[in-house]
Image: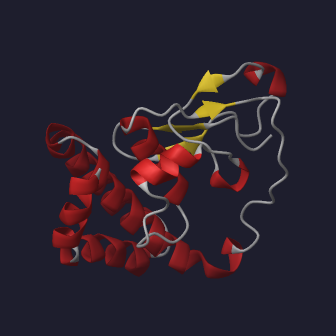
C-alpha cells in the first residue's frame, strides 16, 4: 500500500500516511488533509466552488493544494479503504528529477502562501524555508530548489492575487 491518505506538516511538507505499512492499520474511513489525485472522486460542487488544480502547478503538490482548499471551503476529504486503485507512482518523474525538485519547492511555497492564514505564514514559512535551504546544502538538485524559491519571490504579487480567491 502506497498511501492511506495524506498528511501535511504545519510547515507545509506533505507525506503519505501508511506508506508501505500494513493495510490492517487503515481499515476505516477517515478524514484526511489530502488524498492522492491519481485515485480520487469528488463532488462537482467542490470544483464549481473552489476551481480545480492551480494552473501554475505541475507535479508534485497539486493534489495537496487542491485538497487544502477543499478543506478550507468546508468539504471533507476522506480516505476510504474499500476504494482501491493501482497507481505506479514515480515512473514518469524518475527521468526529470531536477524538474520535479523545482516544481516541488515552488508549489509547496505557493500553496503555503495561498492557503495559510497570515499569522501561520509568519509562523511557519521561515522554518519551511530554513529546511529547504538545509536540503539545498545536503542533497542534490540544488539549483532547481533555489529556482523554486526565486520563482515565488518573482511571482509573489500573482500568488497574493490567487490567495484572495481562497
Seen at 70% across and 55% down, the residue is: 38
Q: Indicate the colouring scheme.
A: secondary structure
Seen at 37% across and 68% down, the residue is: 106
40 and 131: which is toward the camera: 40
138 and 50: which is toward the camera: 50
Residue 76 appears left or right of 149: right
Q: Position of residue 144 (x, y in %)?
A: 42, 78
Residue 28 appears left or right of 114: right
Q: Vertically, is 34 above or below 96?
A: above
Q: Position of residue 127 (x, y in %)?
A: 26, 46
Locate residue 16: give its quadrant: top right
Q: Position of residue 147 (x, y in %)?
A: 34, 79
Seen at 55% across and 34% down, the residue is: 77
129 and 140: which is toward the camera: 129
Does residue 15 appear in this view?
A: yes
Does residue 130 appear in this view?
A: no
Q: Vertically, is 126 above or below 23?
A: below
Q: Position of residue 110 (x, y in %)?
A: 32, 61
Instruction: Say which quadrant the N terminus sits in.
Output: top right
Residue 138 appears left or right of 41: left
Q: How many marks?
A: 0
Amino acid at each position: 500500500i502506497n498511501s492511506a491518505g495524506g498528511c501535511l506538516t504545519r510547515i507545509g511538507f506533505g507525506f503519505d500516511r501508511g506508506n508501505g505499512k500494513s493495510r490492517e492499520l487503515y481499515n476505516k474511513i477517515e478524514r484526511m488533509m489530502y488524498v492522492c489525485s491519481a485515485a480520487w472522486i469528488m463532488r462537482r460542487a467542490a470544483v464549481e466552488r473552489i476551481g480545480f488544480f492551480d494552473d501554475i502547478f505541475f507535479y508534485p503538490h497539486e493534489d495537496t493544494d487542491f485538497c487544502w482548499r477543499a478543506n478550507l471551503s468546508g468539504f471533507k476529504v476522506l480516505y476510504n479503504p474499500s476504494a482501491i486503485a493501482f497507481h505506479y507512482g514515480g515512473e514518469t518523474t524518475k527521468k526529470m528529477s531536477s524538474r520535479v525538485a523545482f516544481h516541488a519547492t515552488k508549489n509547496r511555497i505557493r500553496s503555503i502562501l495561498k492557503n495559510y492564514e497570515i499569522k501561520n505564514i509568519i509562523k511557519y514559512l521561515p522554518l519551511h524555508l530554513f529546511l529547504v535551504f538545509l536540503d539545498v546544502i545536503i542533497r542534490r538538485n540544488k539549483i532547481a530548489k533555489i529556482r523554486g524559491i526565486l520563482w515565488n519571490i518573482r511571482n509573489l504579487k500573482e500568488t497574493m492575487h490567487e490567495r484572495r480567491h481562497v
